[in-house]
Amino acid sequence: MRLIRNFPCQGYRQLEELLQNASSASLPGSGKRQCPEAPDVGRETMLTDIWETPEVLRGLLQVYMKDGVVELPGLRDKLPPEHGLAGRTPLEIMAASSEKRMAEGFTNRFSIIGSGTSWHATLLAEYLIEYMARIPVEAHYASEFRYHEPSLQTGDVVFVVSMSGETADAVESLRQITKSALGKNVLKIAVVNSSSSTLAEESDLVINVQAGAEVGVASTKGFSATGFVFELLSLALADECGTITDAERSIFVKRLHELPEGMQEVLDREAKPLMQTSTDNPIGIGECPLWDIGCQNVLAQNFIFLGRGCSFPVALEGAMKCKELAYIHAEGYPAAEMKHGPIALIDEFMPVVVVCPMADATYEKIKSNIEEVKARNGATIAITEKYNDELEQLCEYVIGLPETHEYLMPILAMVPLQLLAYMMGILRNNTVDHPRGLVKSISVKIEETGSGYAA
Ligand code: BG6
């Protein structure tokens, strides 16, 4: 492990301070690292949000999975007579968009809409539903979707994803559909963290992600809960569309139930030291691998996050958290896209975080992307399964996760990315719970009162 990456220092007093902190703490033999800004564990912080994620996932399994079958409220209830698709259940309507039905001439599809972190959840949903249920899905930025005349067909399905359920771009996107000619003949589903929100009130079906209130403005457990709900929905659709074999299903369900414990294991190793640290109980080198990585790279001016398939939306969200919490410029890319441009950015000052589970069908491909980065002296931080010896050899840093199903790895891999951004944020003395320039949700009200955020 290279100790201190000598990033070009702009001489900021704070950066010098950080350099001072990081270098003094991590010199061999120093053993003890003074945590510059140990979070006041007495009060709730966004670290608490991340820490609560396993419990949130256990809660979702309890309420939405009955005897191995996914039971999302209203999924199997017929739509009311006033609806254009009356008499059919949401699950039937959704399954009618599957590949199998396409052969019969059906051309319905799903549109999933969201903003910010919720948009990354919509992209993850696109991969999961297409992979598991073979249903065509389009993910849309709400801020773009709301200004276009939607092209819809009777029987189409639209999900609007929003933690608050109040984000103006998301609400106006739903209203755009509702008032359109075919608005009555489309199934409108709100995926929200609040059933009393505007989006929930104006939709045909509400899926509550049950994440509970978040302390942090930047969403963490909300993203994980939303991703997990789409894992459950994808399983229900795969059952209904007959696109999953019994063998595949029992492996997936077994892994689904193991996920909260797997996540707890990662948190115990990577977050607990931070929860327990204090000025007279600093974190020692090696005690918390992710904290070491944070200290080693906190002076970076840029980060690149890479992933393939389901891991690509996670790379995007990892980059988003790096921007929101550490104020470090970061970009997320499908790993294979790197050679079509971003690779020009790679040098010894560019940390590259790669989400590369061995469970992923494209693992060998992503390994070669890591070699491309290494060939340009870029520092690679790999998120992969534990005991991945070849990446231990190949990469600068490796964060090992418990094994899980390829399609569930995004939920697990998100936690160390949230923690890394959080740790670099507190190392930079940022107000990580309330990042500068961000609000929890830019609601219609905020927009109307001219809050300085352009519609
Ligand atoms: C922004 C928040 O205002 O809204 C982001 O800062 C969030 O963290 C985005 O992802 C969307 O919010 P929501 O409530 O629609 O998911």
Image (tube, rainbow, N blue to C red):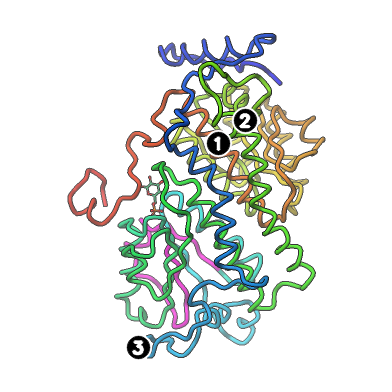
**Secondary structure of the residue carrying numbered label 2:** helix
Left or right side of 329 for 182: left
Specify which label sits upstream in the sequence, 1 or 2. 2
From this view, report whether residue 116 is shown above or below residue 67: above
Q: Earlier in the sequence, mark 2 or mark 3?
A: 3
The kind of secondary structure element at disc 3 is loop
Where is 317 relative to 173, above or below?
A: above
Coordinates of residue 445 in the picture (x, y in percent): 22, 55
The amino acid beneath tag 3 is Glu
Residue 398: in magenta span: no
User: Where does label 3 land, which residue?
Assistant: 82
Residue 162 picture quarter:
bottom left
- The verdict on residue 151 being magenta is yes
CA distance for labels 1 and 3:
47 Å
Drawn side of residue 220 relative to residue 26, left or right: left
User: What span is in magenta?
Assistant: 137-160
- The mark found on residue 290 in the picture is 2
Disc assigned to residue 419: 1
Q: Is residue 311 above or below residue 348?
A: below
Residue 384 percent coordinates (x, y): 71, 42
Q: Is residue 184 left or right of residue 271?
A: left
The amino acid sitting under disc 1 is: Leu
The reply to whether dot 2 and dot 3 touch (C-beta < 8 Å) is no
Seen at 79% across and 69% down, the residue is 247
